Image: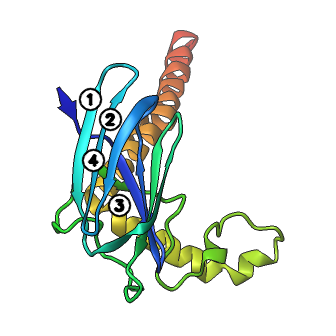
């Protein structure tokens, strides 16, 4: 049975990064066309992966590259020379795909340069003041892209952990000491 591989993506002004998160793939078939990327592979566990991604805009297939490793297959798709705008979506369809996620390790906002890719690795503590607004922008972008449903699920999980690991033991301690007081209380 054919499965859709997990895919992560990011972009710069001049290129798109697509990573297929499939391990131990033997001889993957990757066809990079101007408006579509086709992927077909069989992993070492005999699972068959296949997907055709119709891109939001056209790319330059001749200048695009692919790298196959044991853990993943990475494509670097070169945008057309006249296309330096950031794409709002990877795919032509403007819908959320369950198999497609943002690669936050490579993601850069439109107003950021490539040098500012890793904003959280400061060489000097003084850089913190300089990059505070940049961090705020990055966090807002992550919240915007992630979506409110996922954030509410995270919030509920945090609340549940707080209750489970803090409030419940505290109530148990109060109950224990209250009970001990009643056992040894003499009148």
The CA distance from mark 1 to mark 3 is 29 Å
| Sequence-wise first label, 2 or 1 | 2
Q: Which residue is mark 4?
A: 99
In the rendered image, residue 73, in percent from the top left (x then y), is placed at: 45, 45
| Sequence-wise first label, 4 or 1 | 1
Residue projecting furthest to the bottom: 82
Q: Nearer the viewer, residue 126 or 111?
A: 111
Query: Is label 4 or label 2 in front?
Result: 2
Q: Which image quadrant: the N terminus?
A: top left
Q: In the rendered image of this protein, does residue 158 appear above or below residue 184?
A: below
- Neighbor class of circle 2 (other Cα within 10 Å; few <14, some 14-19, many 20+) is many
In the rendered image, residue 48, in percent from the top left (x then y), is placed at: 26, 29
Say which mark, if any, is on residue 146.
Answer: 3
The CA distance from mark 4 to mark 2 is 16 Å
| Sequence-wise first label, 3 or 4 | 4
Q: Which residue is mark 1?
A: 48
Query: Is label 1 or label 3 in front?
Result: 1
Q: In the rendered image of this protein, does residue 66 appear above or below residue 165?
A: below
Answer left or right for 65 relative to 124.
Answer: left
The CA distance from mark 3 to mark 4 is 14 Å
Q: Which residue is mark 2?
A: 41
For mark 4, give the secondary structure: loop
């Amino acid at each position: 049975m054919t499965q859709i591989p997990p895919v992560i993506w990011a972009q710069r002004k001049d290129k798109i990064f697509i990573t297929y998160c499939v391990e131990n793939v033997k001889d993957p078939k990757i066809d990079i066309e101007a408006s579509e990327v086709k992927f077909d592979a069989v992993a070492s566990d005999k699972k068959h992966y296949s997907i055709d991604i119709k891109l939001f805009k056209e790319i330059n297939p001749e200048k695009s590259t692919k790298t196959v490793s044991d853990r993943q297959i990475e494509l670097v798709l070169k945008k057309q020379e006249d296309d330096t705008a950031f794409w709002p979506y990877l795919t032509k369809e403007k819908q959320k795909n369950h198999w497609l996620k943002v690669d936050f390790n490579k993601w850069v906002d439109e107003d950021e340069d490539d040098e500012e890719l890793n904003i959280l690795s400061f060489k000097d503590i003084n850089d913190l003041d300089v990059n505070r607004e940049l961090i705020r922008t990055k966090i807002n972008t992550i919240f915007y892209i992630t979506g409110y449903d996922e954030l509410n699920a995270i919030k509920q999980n945090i609340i549940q952990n707080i209750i489970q690991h803090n409030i419940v033991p505290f109530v148990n301690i109060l109950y224990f000491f209250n009970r001990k007081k009643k056992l040894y209380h003499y009148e």
